[in-house]
Amino acid sequence: MSDPSSVVPGADAILHARKVTKAFGGLVAVKEVDLEIPRGAIISLIGPNGAGKTTLFNVIAGILDPTSGAVEFQGNRVVARPVRAWLEPVIWTLPAFLVGILAVIVNQVTASAAAAALTVLAAIFLLVVMLLAAIVRPRWYLDLLLRAGVFRSARPNDMVKAGIGRTFQNIRLFANMTALENVQVGMHLKLRANAADALFSTPRARAEEKAAETRARHFLEVVGLKGHGGELAKNLPYGDQRRLEVARALASEPALMLLDEPTAGMNPRETLEMTQLIDRLRHDLGISFLLIEHDMKVVMGISDRVTVLDHGERIAEGTPDEVRADPRVIEAYLGKPAA
Amino acid sequence: MNGAGSRLRDFASAGRAGLNRISSRLRDLASSHRSIAIMVGWAVIATLLPLLVLIPPLSTFQQQKLWIDGFANAGVFILLAMGLNVVVGLAGLLDLGYAAFFAIGAYAYGLGASPFTGLAIPFWPMLLVGAVVAATFGILLGAPTLRLRGDYLAIVTLGFGEIVPAVFLNADKYTNGTNGIGGVLKPELLGFRFTLGNPLPYYIAMVVVLALTMVFLYRLQDSRLGRAWMAVREDELAAASSGVNTVTTKLLAFALGASTAGLAGVFTAAKLTLVSPDQFSFAVSFTVLAMVVLGGMGNIWGVAVGAFVIYTIQSVLLKQLNQFFQTINLPVLKDIDFVQYQFLLYGLALVAMMLLRPEGLFPSSRRKRELHEASEEVADVPPPTEALDG
Amino acid sequence: MRSPVWRVVRPVVTIVLANVIAWLLLGTQQFANFLTLGSIYALIALGYTMVYGIIELINFAHGDVFMVGSFLALWILTVPLGMTGALRDPPTLIVVLAVVMAATMAVMGALGVFIERFAYRPLRHAPRLAPLITAIGVSFILQNVVYTLFGPSPRNVPQVFPLDRFDLLGGKISYLSVFMLVVALGLMVALQLFVGRTRLGRAMRSTAQDREAAELMGVDINQTIAITFFLAAALAGSAGVIQGLYFGSTKFDLGFFAGLKAFTAAVLGGIGNTTGAAIGGFVIAFIEVFATVLGYSRWSEVAVFTVLILVLVFRPSGLLGQQLGERT
């Protein structure tokens, strides 16, 4: 569909997975897989069932920690096996602990109740600050971790913040919220109103909410759900649910979208629409895509490059035509009946 | 004949249409100016209740003064229930030690304004302080716990709810142990001193606090944060994958719930002028949970009404029932102490409610949909196995 | 290094060493208390961990099942058996103990199955909150039923086991505590064998791992869950019998703290892991008894709770557990 020569491996990759391995107990689901997504490309991940595609997806999306290997996104190493994770709780509690010891000393030396109470309060304050920092993960906290040699993978919401949106294989919409609300949740990180804004219903917050609604309707329109905003997600037809998931992911304004079987269970017309939508999003918004897809027509038609997994290992990588001709792929995947 | 009949029908339908128009106008007005509607609603309720109890049979139960006193106490539980509703109803977390935060608020005021410490911080700023202190403990408890699976919170709060009164009991050097802290200062407003003899000022203050809390809660519920709570409640993984920091979101709900309980604690301490460990047993946490569940998780008004109804039943009706059966001397019933069975009843009601009508007596429409999900569909979609456990 | 012999020897050495340290710290008398208390917590914790392992529910009613078990033992001893004091005749004593133990375990097991059937099973596909709320409701119901039947004050359980003691290492140890420890350890080993070696045990493990897959393989899920509840409640019942016989009294709100401590034990050991739960039970009992030895018995609950929080902060997967979903 697009000119394969425009996407050269190695040139300005938006995402780079290096030797990612994920084992569950003794079972190795993904084994030393390399994956590179050039900026603006559509890359497909194919392979028989149980090949480890969704596991790899979940590693990239920050849901699972890899057993080894790492994922770089826009030049930053965001996902890897945790290093010295045990140190993190120590960092949380250490300042409070030290001040606590100080409190004991103060109590012994001065015997002043007020001084002791103040140090205890300071200890509690420090503990609260550290615990909150561990959850919100501000810059200084991450730097602190870095200096202590602690590495923790980004969490799913950090990945969204970094610019990765995703959909799920078995649709995970907020079933009892309306389509519009689903998209508005997707915009969560783009909105700034905090609890205080909400409490006092500040003009800023009200204006933002209004703008958010307009924008959410816009996203619905983009995926072709105009006029369905008020419907509950669970009442939408299957194909529309898939599109709503795309709209929700789109609402976080990602640079890369991970779509897990975006056309599964769709009829040919819906499949075509989804394919066109993906292509349009890439052209209009410059979003890169990583797809897991079973429909070979979709894969071959839309992808710039295709990576083939089998038993957790990458057995082939190349343009659709190259992959189609690869004997190992044919043996492992295409050769099998009704894969 | 026919003409007159049709004219009458026209007239009637015109009248009905007019009424409809008025009521729909009112509803529009209420939804576009919800905060005002809530305030007006509370003002109306607050004026009607004291008048209502002058009418028999209510007037035969107890004096108006006692009724008003009871209403002010009920207000504490309404406040607690609305706060717990944020945790349980909006964010979908189970907090079984809610009374602990109630206790922390009460002790904050007890220590801040009583002869025991010699401090005399005024009541109104202490309302805020109590809320902040309770929220701080909420964060201390929630931050390590909420990173983990949701059910850990339930057991941790269950423990916390027992530990806090135990600490207040055992640390007698700082809390006066079993006896509690007595002589807690009563509120004062612009030179007007609240007294134990007159419950009306407490009642009015309570209504104001309740109205404000409710306005705030509704605003939160409809904000970006409220949407995030809903999303976390529905599907945590999907919420995280939409950019919601689920831990912060849950923690905020937990801390807000705690701060509301802290507020209620300060109020109670000032009203009873006494705080002691036995006021904050697990029974309180359980009662408030029953109020939220029976009232309808997630529905702020429903929870408030549920709390009011349950409080009235337990503090007035059960006692009256005892007296009633004793006066008419019914053989078996007169020997039954209904108050003693109250917790057994709550337990049964809770289980029955979850099994038969999980959305509560006054359901929020959204919550109702969620809780009935199981029977409707679900079956064909296998629950995600890759999800949170990894 | 990692020879099979070492794999067997290492835990044995660890356990013996831990016990020697505990004995040195506690003294013989309190050491016996610690072992009995540990058995009780371990038996309750096993129930928590099994139920959580299989349906991921914190069964708040579990501690109260233990409490009901102790009252049932009390009732069986006093009403049908008419016991008042120690039985000096060993055969009679053994028969009485066997009857009490078997009957309590059977009835409690049935109670567990009943609770699961009516309070949890209908909510298996409901949002997570729903079964948790019924669990706490059931806990309250059990407590208040016992409260109504037996009253608010502690009730004495007849001490049928003679309180004879023998000298050991400078302290006196009652035959009762040795007997109880043997019974408790026997039950734990039996459980391990059941879960590890039998067809039903295999069904339990596979259901815990992946319910859908197990179902596809022909495992009867409802039956398996019912069996899990039966075993869990029966073990809690046996702990209730031990409580009654060893400490000689029971109270309607006993289950609350026992449940909390046992759950802490399960988390400490790594929830879902039966060996971990047993070890956790003894660790918690040690903390409690050690606090008493140091003269801080009033703070023992606070200490246990602090342990729970610390475990959740520093090692949420427990001592022996696998990584639980920390990252959402």
Image (cartoon, coloured by chain):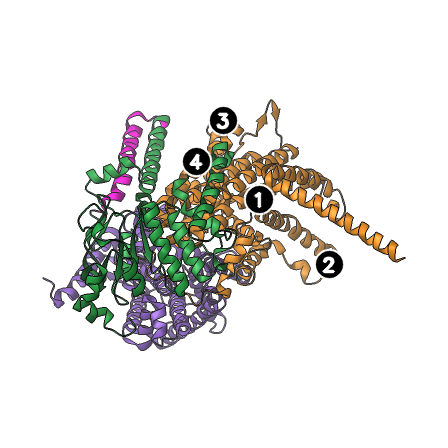
Q: Where residue B329 is drawn, which disc sits there?
A: 2
Q: Which residues are magenta?
A: A84-113
Q: Is residue A107 magenta?
A: yes
Q: Secondary structure at mark 1?
A: helix
Residue type for callout 3 = Ile
Per the model, the C-alpha gap separating discs 1 and 2 is 35 Å
The quadrant holding residue C4 is: bottom left
Residue holding disc 1: B78
Residue type for callout 4 = Val
Q: Where residue B121 is drawn, which disc sits there?
A: 3
Which of the two marks, 3 or 1, is nearer to us in this view?
1
The chain letter corresponding to orange is B
Question: Can you see residue C83?
Answer: no
Contact, mark 3 vs mark 1 (Cβ under 8 Å): no
| Dominant SS in magenta | helix
Q: Chain of mark 2?
A: B
Per the model, the C-alpha gap separating discs 3 and 2 is 52 Å
Give coordinates of residue C181: x percent, y percent.
Answer: 30, 65
Residue holding disc 4: B133
Give coordinates of residue C88: x percent, y percent.
Answer: 37, 72
Contact, mark 2 vs mark 4 (Cβ under 8 Å): no
Q: Chain of mark 3?
A: B
Vertical placement of B383 versus B49: above or below? below
Sequence-wise, the earlier of marks 3 and 1 is: 1
